[in-house]
Amino acid sequence: MATKQVSIPSIGTVILYKRRGNRSLRLSIGANGDIRASLPFWLPYKAGEQLALSKALWIADNRGRTRQALQTGHAIGKAH
């Protein structure tokens, strides 16, 4: 898997992943706020950069929204 990190001034650091099994571009935000773009192996890295630039508003809206991790003492299961 080939990777490349790109720094975009309005967004921050975007990690671009090239995968052989991918057929389309995918943009995701990790739990710690890192931005990842996954793209097909045959597509240039520039396409991933352009995707991140075109979705800058979406990234800004969703970057602060992270799933809350379970703390010790939180109950899980059917009864809770």
Image (spheres, helix red, strand yellow):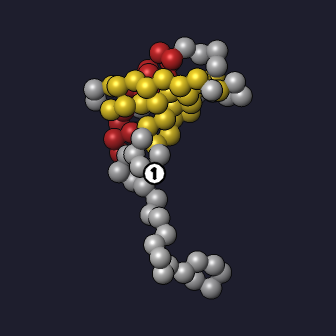
Residue at 39%, 53% in the rendered image: 65
Looking at the rendering, in which quadrant would you find the N terminus?
A: top right
- Identify which residue, 6 or 50, lies in the foreground: 6
Residue at 47%, 46% in the rendered image: 30
Q: Measuring from the top left, give residue 36's x and y in whole percent.
A: 49, 35
- Left or right for 72, reference 78: left
Q: Amino acid at mark 1?
A: Ala
Residue 39: quarter of image: top right
* 42 up-or-down from 16: above or below: above
Can residue 6 be seen in the rendering of this structure? yes
Q: Measuring from the top left, give residue 15's x and y in whole percent.
A: 46, 30
* 39 up-or-down from 68: above or below: above
- Left or right for 16, reference 54: right
Residue 58: quarter of image: top left
Q: Which residue is mark 1?
A: 31
Q: Secondary structure at mark 1?
A: loop
* 69 up-or-down from 61: above or below: below
Furthest residue toward left: 9
Residue at 33%, 32% in the rendered image: 12
Q: Measuring from the top left, give residue 54's x and y in whole percent.
A: 41, 26
